[in-house]
Amino acid sequence: MIKKFKKSSEATQAAIVFVATFIILFAGIQLGLISSYQTGIIISVLINISLAVSLSLVTGYLGELALGHAGFMAIGAYTAGLITLNINLSPMIAFPFALLIGGLITGLMGIIIGIPALRLRGDYLGIITLGFGEIIRIILNNLTITGGPKGLSGIPKYTNFIWAYWVTTIIVIVIFLLMNSRHGRAINAIRENEIAAESVGIPVAYYKTFAFAVSAFFAGISGGLYAHYLTQLYPKKFDFLYSIEILVIVVLGGMKSLKGTIIAAIILGFASEYLRRYAEYRMIIYSMLLIAIILLKTKGITLKSIKEMILKTLKKNKETSTIEGSE
Amino acid sequence: MSLLEINNLSVNFGGIKPVKNFDLTVNDNELVGLIGPNGAGKTTVFNLLTGVYIPTEGSIEIDGENIVGKKPYKIVEHGITRTFQNIRLFKSMTVIDNVKTACHHHMKYSAMDGILRSKKYKDIEIAVEKEAYRLLEIFDMEDLANETSNNLPYGMQRKLEIARALAGKPKLLLLDEPAAGMNPNETLELMETIKMINEKLNVAILLIEHDMSLVMGICQRIVVIDYGKVIARGTPKEIQSNKKVIGAYLGAGA
């Protein structure tokens, strides 16, 4: 009984946080306290959150390296963009429809790519997903329907703060709920020990493909948001570096922590925007961050890990000073 | 009809035949020991039974149904679950989640039920939670339910692995060296637990073990293999005085 109560209070707490954040930001935008430039940053951060959270399903929870997330996003972006360009309906119907179809087609591609790709593991899966991401980009570059290298332009600008916020929130909540059901437990178990997972009755191949498809589905939806925010799409935007950027967010966020991923997306999003002057060094900083995290073996940047790190160094200093003192 | 019937089971890895013409029957509620020197092929038999390896020859029937060629996760549905020689827990998951995960195949709700937190989801999750606690109580571990399983002491991890195997509601439980690395007291306690599982939960057990006090103490029947072949079968008493068995363990001259 106590546990149940705790669970429901956690849910209300989360709901309060989501609604309060929305009200604060929305009021800020309406009152002009947040400029349209800053609103733009917030929207791109929200899109990055939805992308990173969807990638964390594969990289964090399932524990497989995937480097083609921008490719999935591109499929969703182009599909949704083409739908709204060719359908004359009110935005309230056309936009969610385009997002959903974009997500579904991307999810389907996720299954098609996932079935052969997930026979591989670790670095090999990383390489093959990287290859698939590039193949998608090159196909988009050469099809006439997608406008080739010139891309698609004139996509209606449907993605505003409200849409971006609530779509991202729904994605986060759905992934959270999914990870706390039997499906989530199965995916976690596969990461922990594949042989043991299979031995307790979990169809490993099915759940790997399932995680890959759901991840692609949500990446497709974020792609749709992205398309209707930028209003024009070029294949070049969805290159390998974008996949790496999303991966960095997930790794910094601690791999399997939704909270951490969201915080990392916010920090990196604002940092890369306000440090635009040093944009050339961005990839260097990202790589160094990744190396630092791997070396320090921290589970991403969380308040707890920072606190622990500080305590550790303090303790070390104390120890060395006492040793020196005794000598 | 017996619960498990293995006929003429063989497997080849290239030129090596770790298991040759192996026969075994296990009846309902029986407790059978499988022993043999190191490298005799005991664990390979388990891997063949659970579908990790596919036999080159022979049949494995559970309740009269052939399970050769089925995937490991399908074989769980036929009622065989196992533990591992080197512990394979879901280390960073909690104790209770380890057990719940193993209930996977008899929890039938869709991903949609999970996302929408439907009534079906709640009913099944509550039932599974009760079931998981009941299993942990058998091993006196209910207080540790929310502990990360990697933090448990070694003996507890072994017990948790058995609890997890039981969560799949097996008819036949395969235990691969459950007492490995345990001290005599822990082994004694484990012996009682295995006996109790066998008697109270009506689960047949096939047990690999090197600790002879445990094997001789609780097994109703023992099968000895060496170089992949059965060299002796019988009650613990018969096995203890069998010349072939003594020869296999100590060398033919003994």
Image (spheres, coloured by chain):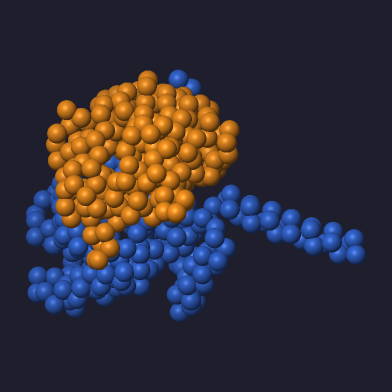
**Residue B196 position in % (x across, y down):** 42, 23
User: Compared with residue A37, is residue B27 higher up or lower down, i.e. above or below?
Assistant: above
Residue A107 visible here: no
**Residue under the image location 55 percent in, 66 percent down:** A295
With B182 as the anchor, is A89 left or right in this view? left
Q: Nearer the viewer, residue A118 or B2?
A: B2
With B139 as the anchor, is A296 left or right in this view? right
Judging from the image, what is the letter of the chain drawn in orange?
B
Residue A226 visible here: yes
Q: Determine which quarter of the picture holds residue B1.
A: top left
* Count of marks, rendered view: 0
With A283 as the anchor, is A57 left or right in this view? left
With A222 as the anchor, is A278 left or right in this view? right
**Residue A172 position in % (x across, y down):** 35, 46
Quadrant, the C terminus of chain A: bottom right
User: Compared with residue A62, is residue A285 higher up or lower down, i.e. above or below?
Assistant: below
**Residue A307 position in % (x across, y down):** 63, 52
Quadrant, the N terminus of chain A: top left
Judging from the image, what is the letter of the chain drawn in blue?
A
**Residue A239 position in % (x across, y down):** 29, 73
Q: Determine which quarter of the picture holds residue A215.
A: bottom left
**Residue under the image location 79 percent in, 57 percent down:** A318
User: Compared with residue A228, is residue A304 higher up or lower down, i.e. above or below?
Assistant: above
**Residue under the image location 26 percent in, 33 percent down:** B26
